[in-house]
Image: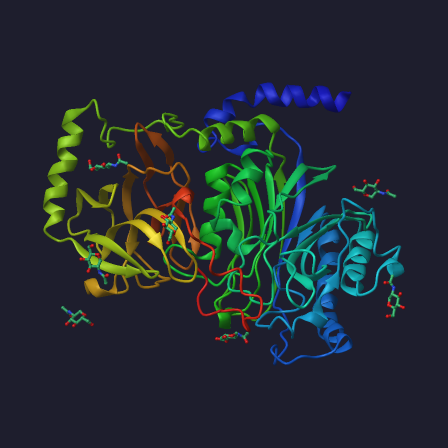
Amino acid sequence: MLRFMAKITFGISCTLVLFCYQVLSVEVCRREHFVAAVYEHHVILNPNPTAVTDRQSALDLMKKNLDIYEEQVIAAAEQGAQIIIFPEDGIQGFNFTRASIYPYLDLIPFPDSVTWNPCKEAYLFNDTEVLHRLSCMALKNQLFLVANVGTKQFCEPSDPSCPPDGRYQFNTNVVFSDNGTLIARYRKQNLYFEYAFNTPAEVDYIVFDTPFAGKFGIFTCFDILFYEPAVPLIKQYNVKQVVYPTAWMNQLPLLSAVEFQQAFATAFSIHLLAANIHHPDLGMTGSGIYTPTKSFIFYDMESVNGKLIVAEIPVILEHETQMANSVISNIQKSFSSFPMDTLVCHKEDQKDCSEIAEGASKAALHIFYGEMMYDNFTLAPILEAEGNIHVCSNTLCCYLNYQRLDSSNELYVLGVFDDLHTVHGTYYVQACVLVKCGGSNYTTCGQEVTKATGMIDFQLQGNFTTAFIFPLLLKSDITLDFADHLGWKNNYYVMQKRGGSSGLITAGLYGRWYEKDSNRTLYNKNVNGYSKNLNKRD
Ligand SMILES: *[C@@H]1O[C@H](CO)[C@@H](O)[C@H](O)[C@H]1NC(C)=O
Ligand SMILES: *[C@@H]1O[C@H](CO)[C@@H](O)[C@H](O)[C@H]1NC(C)=O
Ligand SMILES: *[C@@H]1O[C@H](CO)[C@@H](O)[C@H](O)[C@H]1NC(C)=O
Ligand SMILES: *[C@@H]1O[C@H](CO)[C@@H](O)[C@H](O)[C@H]1NC(C)=O
Ligand SMILES: *[C@@H]1O[C@H](CO)[C@@H](O)[C@H](O)[C@H]1NC(C)=O
Ligand SMILES: *[C@@H]1O[C@H](CO)[C@@H](O)[C@H](O)[C@H]1NC(C)=O
Ligand SMILES: *[C@@H]1O[C@H](CO)[C@@H](O)[C@H](O)[C@H]1NC(C)=O
């Protein structure tokens, strides 16, 4: 009862924060906190993943990774963690074929049909050694544990979608409560060329409950870019926290792991607990614990060692998420959460608008095209110490008002893309970006850069059709920053940032127009393909 009343009090005293969420510190309200841990794991890989082996050899390899997991669970528990998340593919690795991964797969009963504690009831099912080990770690250390495992589920030939070999193989996240009970399993929806695995016949919308922070949603890696299951989880199931195992290959300038993870948490006003694989040689690093206004991240391309991140974060209150939901579902986009200064081109303010148009005509002389992450962006260079420029593509126009604060000659461009992305996955992107080029030649724009000294005050905006916009703000050496202002102003989504303290790599409004993804069917259905494509993660 006391707890209930306390919650009401928090609710009232936090009303202001709803409207000033990006401006005021989260700490303005006294509220409950919880301690979360994510582990970026240097997975010990099978040197020959395509060779078919036996169960015992598979268990021997996985034991090496599970031993490291156990050390980290103990370390996290010592720091008070109540939940820990491990990355996708962290136990068995990747690059298997459908046949070669089979010995690595655990059998998994549906948690909703059977209450099962693998640690206490080890011999209820065969081929559950990995689940057993994970369950015991959760139980012994009394924390919630989220891990990614390969699982198998046998099916009958009468099932029309049953693969010819009589079994489904799923890329699966499992969740254990602090007493070792298996409380949830999520099967990855948007496989990334993982021919060893099947896509589940129906989307898993998985929500699990915790005594310390309420409900969590769950999905995996590539899922973060798609509508299913992420958006319904947040909109309809009203989750305030997401646990997110991933094995993400960084791709600059728009899809570095930490960059997009933060953008997702900010866009939906949620917590994201993201654990990535640590393999700098494969471009994999970047994990974090994200709140809508603060991020605790790890990114390291030098060391080969994994990293445990532990952070105390506030519990997001119910009504805050409802607010976020109303924002993202508001297709009219009339909601304006933040005060805009006079830089914005208001429709009712002809003077500002004509200034922008003037700048645009100047920029039009210098428009060129450049490939960025396999997409043909329309680009315009930043040539002056300050100015207004715009670029358009299809139905999207992007406007930039800028003032350079540094005297470096580093080349920056304003870019726009409004089209279907078709390389390594098919999905529709609407993007307005301000990025640093690789050098002073226009042909270097769109390249991956990690260092910058250019400091720019800017306001970036676009007349997006989609309401789903992920704000990117990446600084030199892959550090993150937050915008000063972010939100809709009339039909424009606006990001504003002043006084950036370090070099700017990317400021971006990465929109996902999910309805236009269409025909994205080709890459999940192959049952007998042979290898996970790891060339590029995008
Ligand atoms: C996985 O396979 C791809 C090509 O199929 C290869 O480029 C990559 O290096 C492999 N990764 C590992 C870790 O073996
Ligand atoms: C486990 O496997 C053994 C040996 O194949 C078999 O005898 C037993 O019935 C299986 N148990 C279960 C629960 O499936
Ligand atoms: C174990 O945890 C689950 C989930 O938190 C809970 O429902 C269940 O009652 C617990 N079981 C025991 C024996 O405490
Ligand atoms: C990029 O788009 C422009 C405008 O549609 C077009 O003229 C150009 O050929 C395209 N470039 C490439 C490499 O496809
Ligand atoms: C965005 O603005 C341009 C230029 O005014 C316009 O042609 C385009 O139709 C607008 N797009 C939308 C979705 O309103
Ligand atoms: C820019 O790069 C292109 C392609 O590498 C090259 O052909 C061109 O000469 C370069 N321009 C300048 C001004 O260096
Ligand atoms: C999907 O592809 C079919 C045939 O290629 C095409 O007719 C249809 O318009 C496409 N759907 C969308 C939404 O683009």
- Image quarter hosting the C terminus: bottom left
* Nearer the observer, 204 or 30: 204
Which quarter of the rendering shows the N terminus? top right
Percent position of residue 404, x then y: 23, 47
Front residue of 162 and 518: 162
Q: Residue at x 51, y 31 (%)?
A: 325
Question: Seen from this angle, which residue lies furthest front?
Answer: 158
Q: Which residue is nearer to you in this view: 38 or 431? A: 431
Left or right of 356, for residue 336? right
Relative placement, left or right, of 443 versus 191 is left
Which residue sits at x=28%, y=39%? 462
Which quadrant of the figure has residue 457?
Answer: top left
Q: Is residue 28 visible?
A: no
| Residue 484 location, quadrant | top left
Residue 370, percent from left and from top: 24, 60
* Quadrant assignment, res 388: top left
The answer to whether residue 42 is left or right of residue 521 is right
What colour-coding does the image apply? rainbow
Q: Position of residue 25 (x, y in %)?
A: 51, 33
Question: Is 168 drawn above or below residue 242 in the view shown?
Answer: below
State whether residue 386 appears in this view.
yes
Q: Is residue 528 left or right of residue 351?
A: right
Image: 417 above or below 306: above
- Residue toward you, 524 or 41: 524
Give the residue displayed 81% in from the left and 51% down from the top.
180
